[in-house]
Amino acid sequence: MTPNPYLFIVIFVGVALVFPLIPLALAWLWRRFFQPPKPGAQKNAIYECGVESIGEAQIQFRSQYYLYAIIFLIFDVEAIFLVPFAVAFTGLPVGAFVAILVFLLLLIEGLVWAWGKGCLNWAR
Amino acid sequence: MSEIDEALRNELQRQGVWVTSMQELYNWGRKNSIWPLQFGLACCAIEMIATAASRYDIARFGGEVFRPSPRQADLMIVAGTVTKKMAPQIVRLYNQMPDPKYVISMGACAISGGPFKQGYNVLKGIDRYIPVDVYIPGCPPRPEALLHAFMELQRKIDSQKLTGASRAEHLDPAEPSEFPVPSFGEHDLEPPANRDVFHPAKIERQS
């Protein structure tokens, strides 16, 4: 008689449950009979680098940060596309050339827009 | 739980029966898996790193697992000069370590301020705020000295009792697990020392 092919999964789940439960049970028994728990404000603190945490964890990022995302796209992501474009420049068909030009134009348009908006001015 | 009679143990061992007690088993496991907290303060930390590296190899004593989190550490090696700016952080890290926890005060600076004792910003010994188990003199102590301190700590752990009036601190509900963190005062840390912990040796001068 062949065992059910899913039997080993059941065994696996059983072992996966029992294996972590044994140390937890032992720790609980140890705490119950020998070691008294000693919780404290600092021991239970969330941050564990020795410095007290300041403020709330649920903070909001200002929506003005979208400017950084746009300028990052223009200067950083564009460079990644420009390098393979420059390498394959001579062998490109016309369609691919026009496509990359459109892409560049879109990014340049973004740059012109950011320039006009004054994002590139050094903040004083 | 109680101590085993040595003669009886030897007699049984001769017959091929190995007996132990819960206390011995517990301490044997603890003393051979001391995980230090990974942090160094000054040049003593370089010696601590050398102790952990292959030449001196603290792994032989079960202490190679330097934990970057106090939650997983058993031993705090205060390796180097403790500035007054750093002292509250060290006490807080000590407080965040789970029981049982031990402290090795490594080097002259951690013991007493060492060569920088006169400095306005140097704490004159970490034992002013947290209880220290082993002191290592030296400036800096050699890795062998740290290994010796480690073995001394293992000896201490091995001798700790599980029950009774003289049991280990972490098993006694009356013993504190956290110590007050000093704050920055106008000129010095407030308080300058925790009197419940700090018991300096009395110097008796002969006139």
Image: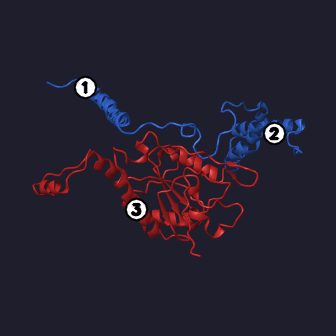
Three-letter code, disc 3: Glu
Instruction: Give how far apart the Cα atoms at labels 1 and 2 are.
Output: 62 Å
B110 lies left or right of A5 = right
Element type where label 3 sits in the image = helix
Q: Residues within 10 Å of mark 3 (few under 14, many from 20)?
A: some
Q: Which mark is residue B152?
A: 3
Percent position of residue B191, x then y: 66, 50
Tell me if residue B32 can be seen: no
Percent position of residue B101, x then y: 46, 49
B84 lies left or right of B45 = right
Percent position of residue A71, x then y: 78, 40
Q: Residues within 10 Å of mark 1 (few under 14, many from 20)?
A: few
Three-letter code, disc 2: Ile
Q: Residues within 10 Å of mark 2 (few under 14, many from 20)?
A: some
**What residue is shown at x 51% (from left), y 53% (from top)?**
B131
Query: Of tags 1 and 2, which is closer to the observer?
Result: 1
Colour of chain B as rendered: red
Colour of chain A as rendered: blue
Question: Which residue lies under the disc numbered 1?
Answer: A7
B171 lies left or right of A71 = left
Residue B157's image quarter? bottom left
Which residue reaches farthest bottom? Answer: B207
Question: Which residue lies under the disc numbered 2?
Answer: A108
Image quarter where the C terminus of chain A lies is: top right
Three-letter code, disc 1: Leu
